[in-house]
Image (cartoon, rainbow, N blue to C red):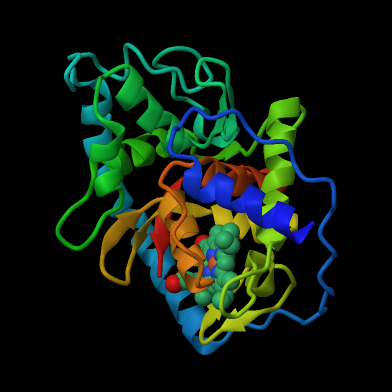
Amino acid sequence: MKQHLIGALCALAFVGGSIAQTPKKPAAKPAPKPAQAAVAEEKDAATLEFEKFRAEMEDSNPAELFEMKGAEQWKAKRGPKNVSLAESCDLGQGVGKIDGAYVKMPRYFADADAVMDAERRIVWCMVEKQGFLFDDIAKRPFANETFTPDITNLVTYVAAHSRNMKIDVPLKDPKVRDAYEIGKEIAAYRAGPYDFSCNTCHGSDGKRIRMQNLPNIATPKGALSGVQGWPGYRMTGGVMLTHQWRMGDCFRQQRFPQPKYASDAVAYLLTYMIGNANGQTYKGPGIKR
Ligand code: HEC
């Protein structure tokens, strides 16, 4: 069984180079439930201070700069094929339609035969419709102090068009359900030098590391805090970062190898986490500390 799980996880995360892979069937065994420690949520002074600061910042949200760049890039004819995403990219609501698209992803896309989160889907469009090379995008997919990739602007733009809308991952779709179940398994999968899983840090209430509260992504409330504010302008470093980045960075915290950019593994984890936040209101791109 363990061999099988390891095999499945490795295949998902590290062999899955193609962005249009057929989802694998979930393994049968459900993960054992982590003990739910009922620890009261208390906010320390630093958290309160940051929340105050964030409330002030949100009046002039730096994410808007990236949103504006993304708007230009969405509409511009670009890439070897010289077409715009606005005239070619279907995010699940029809070609070029972005209103409400972000909160309804991950979803299954028949043309790619894959479950895709928003970032993965936009990358797919850039490759398939505009003719960009996946490897070029995947070389530097995330922002740093001196560089913000186009994909980050585009995701921010698309996400902003779901502001104040209900999160609605189509979990009734059997393909999305499968992805959700695999994502749930990945979240519970323990390995690496410390034998950590996502759930070690995010599977029960009231956990924290240093000053960070760690949301319990299995609950609607915790999952929402894992969704809210992403893509987000990160005060630490002053960079705009996406959900794909967040997942990758937590694999690092877990001392796992990095998952492939825009891979099945990340899409499935996001399906699990965002799916758990279904029915709640997304407030748009935000600020993260
Ligand atoms: C060793 C503990 C640890 C593990 C394991 C871990 N994380 Fe995290 N996670 C953190 C910490 C610490 C933060 C806050 C980081 C920060 O704000 O700089 C965080 C932040 C997050 C956030 C953002 C929360 C928010 O408020 O926006 C999400 C979502 C998340 N992790 C998901 C995951 C997933 C999915 C996994 C498994 C792949 C995982 N984490 C594994 C420690 C961990």
Residue at image location 57% in from the left, 72% down from the top: 192
The quadrant holding residue 30 is bottom right
In the rendered image, residue 37, in percent from the top left (x then y), is placed at: 81, 79
- Left or right placement of residue 70 versus residue 168 in this view: left
- Left or right placement of residue 43 versus residue 34 in this view: left
Q: Which residue lies furthest to the front in this view?
A: 3
207, 251: nearer the viewer: 251
Residue 169 vs 240, above or below: the answer is above
Residue 216 visible in the picture: yes
In the rendered image, residue 125, in percent from the top left (x then y), is placed at: 36, 23
Residue at image location 37% in from the left, 39% down from the top: 155
19, 33: nearer the viewer: 19
Residue 67 visible in the picture: no
On-image quarter of the C terminus: bottom left
Residue at image location 23% in from the left, 38% down from the top: 136
Residue 133 vs 208, above or below: the answer is above
On-image quarter of the N terminus: bottom right
* Quarter of image, ligand 1: bottom right
259, 284: nearer the viewer: 259
All told, the count of numbered labels is 0
- Left or right placement of residue 155 versus residue 3 in this view: left
- Left or right placement of residue 163 versus residue 276 in this view: left
The quadrant holding residue 161 is top left
In the rendered image, residue 16, in percent from the top left (x then y), is placed at: 49, 40
In the rendered image, residue 85, in percent from the top left (x then y), is placed at: 31, 20
17, 47: nearer the viewer: 17
